[in-house]
Amino acid sequence: MEGHDGLTPLCRQTKWTEGLWLHCHSYCGPEKTSVCGGLNNARNRIQTCIRLAIDAGAGLILPSATERDEDHLVKTNGAVRVCPEVFWNVEYLQASLKEQCPQLKLRMCDDRKGIKNVVQTPRRHYLEAAHKNGTFRKFVSAAFDKSPFNLTDVSIKNPVVVNFGDSFIGWNYKESGELMTLRKALFKVIRFNQSLLDMSSKIGQHPKLNNGAYIGVHLRGEDDWPHEFGPVADQMRFYTAEIQRIQKTASYNIKTIYVSCGDEGAIKRFRDILTPLGFTVESKSTLLASSNGTLAQVESLAFDQKAIVEYQTLVDARFWMGLVMSSMSSLIAYARSIDNEEDFFSAYIFPGSTRNGAERAYPTVPDMKGNRVTKLMVVNGVDIMDSFP
């Protein structure tokens, strides 16, 4: 399996069981069948669930997702349950999988209609060993052995749901030999909600962003951002140095900085640092200020939906920087480099570091690492990239 075509031959080679359904979630929400953990944890679960379903040869029941508590952003397992299309382009997902993996049947938003028989499975913690080629199929078979049902009896007329919960990073693409194949193919079938991306285009096409000649910054300055993941003061210091380096080495004058952050106060503090240095700092608020209707529409969105609105603007920036401990930053870095011949993280972020279990340590922290156009501020901590995005 080569390139992004690995999905089609994999699905052809898989032994599928008609009537077998995987309901894959994180045991969140009022019904304990939702994914949670924030936007990109939930996105990772969706991508992982597709891969697990293929490994098991089962249809997939896409889970609902919970919304954050807007007053306490760290609380992602809220009481409000929404269907996947609120965050992702489900029509595109269905069309892509119908073309590339027609054997994989989908049900939407916790739909178990007409299926009475359910096989329960042990809950997996995210730091436990992730699944790889063949292990989830064996896991499902073992679960049937402990249930009242026989896997060989499953059929369209006698369907069974395998109920499986897992919080994060549940499939190891590296150990499966899929970092440069299946991981890319699955990433490309999951797009964010198109109406939210359309709002993003209004930001990215703004004349002040100079047809893409701007530096994008993903700043984490919200109250819920853990200090050990990279304090906002460190981010501002290292980003400022990197911005000045870009200005000195670019062959053209680049002075526009687009900053994405969920805290307007943090953006203002960063602007106060950069403005005396000759830079102009823009944000969604400044660029949409003259479009009151669009700005009001964006501001009315939930925290994670606002992140989607800014996602494409950061992916499209001529230069960009974020931080390795942010799943959104890691997603953006991956999206910006997905068509490179080498894996961005293996080639530019990890060299010189050491890994002990899930933890990765760098020789100098904090530090900026990356290629010429995409940089991440690194600190020591859990490395998710074998199983992400």
Image (spheres, grey):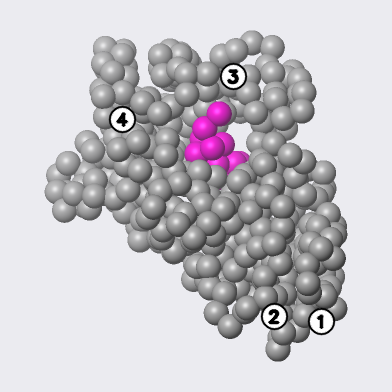
Q: Position of residue 248 (x, y in %)?
A: 46, 16
Task: Give, as a three-letter code, the residue at label 4.
Answer: Asp
- From the viewer's perspective, tell me whether residue 254 is left or right of residue 363: left
Of marks 4 and 1, the one in the foreground: 1
Of the numbered discs 1 and 3, the one sitting upstream in the chain is: 1
Residue 244 visible: no
Judging by the rendered image, the residue that carries numbered circle 2 is 159
Q: Where 230 falls versus 53 (above or below)?
A: above
Residue 128 visible: yes
- From the viewer's perspective, tell me whether residue 127 is left or right of residue 267: right
Q: Position of residue 385 (x, y in %)?
A: 67, 38
Task: Give, as a three-letter code, the residue at label 3.
Answer: Val
Numbered badge on residue 153: 1
Q: Where 148 falls versus 376 (above or below)?
A: below
Judging by the rendered image, the residue that carries numbered circle 4 is 263
Judging by the rendered image, the residue that carries numbered circle 3 is 379
Of marks 3 and 2, the one in the foreground: 2
C-alpha separation, residue under disc 1 versus residue under disc 3: 51 Å
- From the viewer's perspective, tell me whether residue 202 is left or right of residue 175: left
Task: Give, as a three-letter code, the residue at label 2.
Answer: Pro
Task: Give, as a three-letter code, the residue at label 1.
Answer: Asp
The magenta stretch is 325-339
C-alpha separation, residue under disc 2 versus residue under disc 4: 48 Å
Residue at disc 4, secondary structure: loop
